[in-house]
Amino acid sequence: MSEELIDFVIAWVDGSDPAWQSQKNLWLNRIGKDSAFIDAGDNRYRDWDNLRYWFRAVETYAPWVHKIHFVTCGQIPDWLNTHAPKLNLVNHRDFIPQQYLPTFSSHPIELNLHRIPGLSQQFVYFNDDFFLTKPVQPEDFFVKGLPCDSISEEPFEFDKEDIFNHILINNMIYVNRHFDRLSARKRHPWKWYNLRCPHESLKNLLMSRLRNQNFFGLAYSHLPQSFLKSTLEAVWESEPQLLDQTCSHRFRDQRDVNQYVFCYHQLLSGNFYPSSRRKSGSVFSGTWDPKQAAEVIEGRRCKMICINDSHITDFESAKNMVNSAFSRVLPNKSSFEL
């Protein structure tokens, strides 16, 4: 059982808001809509209209959470109970340095989370497409004051032209500036090879035959991520110019790094408790079947789910199917709703 308080952080935007769209387009025109560096596609911002189910799930499945920091650019859903005891409304300007605002990228938001006033040392970060789907306990996220996670070497596969691939490479450049692959394995061997993480340990064993000193890829998980606030502070101290460059970009940019640099820093420093998230979550990304996602939600087959819409073609149909499943499982209002 974790001895310290654990906060949840969720970042959200209403991409259908006309005022927000106007500001976004203004900045796009300044930068150049056709810039090869940026990704400002509509799927980055469209709203699935299921945020209320995120709050219902947290109240139902994680009643022990200390505080929920709800991060927006000032947008507030009309159904939200802003006086809910555990809710902390966080405007971008409350924690992101002014020179990076306004931002239309998740990266400056994520890279500055440690600046949120009152944020606990232990926190779990949620994108707005991450949901709890059955009861969780503090030890699903932290054990002995350490984030629950697993490390796994995995060469990156770049099967398509995508800005995200550039970001993954930038993350690895950061990693190789600060960590030696062979030394990292020797420092914390039981974290690289652990029966709690059999799949990851087997991959690490196979990769151990390669004697390269540089990392060529680390697995990443698109599920709620446990962080120590001190990790973010340490990475900022080690690479202020790199993070500053990313934060200065108004839109997602191929020159960016992202929150995975924090995750990798935690892992390679040994600041984690071995725990396989493969057993606790399902990720629906790329081309996926909304019917299957609905079945996972209703069947409570795992503790967490990611519903990523980057390649959804029939958005309205997928949204209705997924939200109908949430409404059947979580029909009652939470204390976060009016």
Image (cartoon, rainbow, N blue to C red):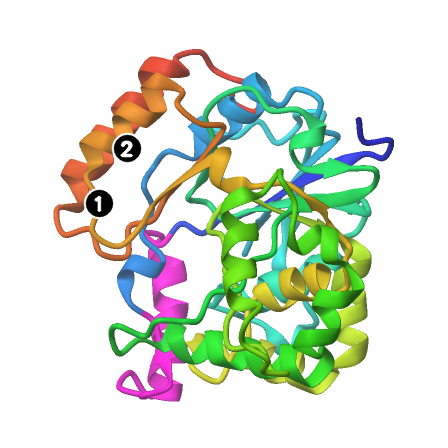
Residue at which label 2 appears: 293
Question: Residue 95, can we see it?
Answer: no
Residue type, numbered disc 2:
Ala
In the figure, 31 relative to 46: above or below?
below
Q: In the shown orientation, is residue 210 left or right of residue 265?
A: left
Please give the label number shown on residue 313: none
Q: Residue at x 39, y 12 (%)?
A: 331
Label 2 close to label 1 by CB (< 8 Å): yes
Compared across the picture, whether 136 is left or right of 36 comes to right
The 10 Å Cα crowd at callout 2, few under 14, some 14 to 19, many 20 or more, is many
Q: Residue at x 39, y 70 (%)?
A: 24
Q: Amino acid at mark 1?
A: Trp
State the residue lying farthest toward the front. 209
Give yes or no for residue 24 being in the magenta stretch. Answer: yes
Q: Nearer the viewer, residue 124 or 20?
A: 124
- At which x and y percent is residue 165? 39, 75
Q: Quadrant of residue 329?
A: top left
Residue at the spot of label 1:
288
Residue interval drawn in magenta: 15-40
Question: Residue 86 appears at what percent x and percent y?
Answer: 70, 28
Residue 3, quarter of picture? top right
Q: Position of residue 4 (x, y in %)?
A: 85, 35
- Residue drawn at the location 76% of the way across and 66% of the way down: 186
